[in-house]
Image (cartoon, helix red, strand yellow):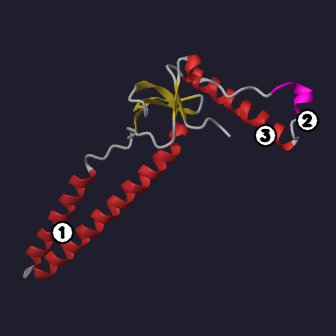
Amino acid sequence: MTAPGAIVCSDLATVSLLQELYAEHWGEAAQDAITNGQSQLLRGLALPSPAPSLYGCSLLPPGIPVQAEKAGGLLDSTPLLKVTARLPNGTIIHGVTNGIMLEGIQQRLNLIAAEKQRQQDLGEQERLSGCVELATTQEAKQQCVAESNERREEQRRPFDDTKAP
C-alpha cells in the first residue's frame, strides 16, 4: 500500500522518499499483524507512519479537488505533475506530485470526457439525420453534411490532451 492520498512536495525526490517511507511503514505494520507482533522480535518496532509536514510536504486526502498540469514530461519514467489544491482546513498548497497518485482521478475525468463526446456525437448525428431528411435537393443535403462536419471540428478544436485537468 502507498500513501493514503497524494503526496505534494516542492520536488519529486521528496515525494519518492515519502512514498518509500509509507511503503515500508505499511509493510512492517502488515508483518506485525500477520505474526501477532512477533516480527518485532527480529527488527524492533515498526516504523511510524511518515509525517509529510516534517519534509515540507502535504498529503492530499482522496476526494480533494486538484488542479494539475504536466511539469516537464517524464522523469525516470515517473509522470511529474504540478498541482494546486485547497486542503479541508482552507490552506492552499502548491507543489509537485507523482502523476500515478492522481491516476484514478485522471481515469474518471477521461471517462467523463469520453461520455460527453459520445453524447455530442449522438446529438450531431440526430441533427444531421433530421437535416438530410428535410433537405429537398442534393445540394441541400451536401450543405447539411458540411455544416455538421464544421460543428464537429469546432467541438474538437479546444480539446488539448497535453494538459492535465
Give the residue number, with chain letter if any, for mark 3. Answer: 30
Q: Position of residue 58 (x, y in %)?
A: 51, 26
Give the residue number, with chain letter if any, for mark 2. Answer: 38
Q: Which residues are the magenta region? A: 38-45
Side of 23 relative to 69 (left or right) = right
Answer few, some or many: residues within 10 Å of disc 3's Cα (few below 14, many 20 plus, some between 14 and 19). Answer: some
Q: CA distance from mark 3 to mark 1?
A: 62 Å
Residue 105 to residue 47: above or below:
below
Residue at x 19% of width, y 59% of height? 151
Give the residue number, with chain letter if any, for mark 1. Answer: 145
Q: Nearer the viewer, residue 157 or 38?
A: 38
Which amino acid type is shown beneath numbered disc 1? Val
Q: CA distance from mark 2 to mark 1?
A: 74 Å
Q: Nearer the viewer, residue 37 or 154?
A: 37
Helix or strand or loop: what does disc 1 sit on? helix
Q: Position of residue 6 (x, y in %)?
A: 53, 34
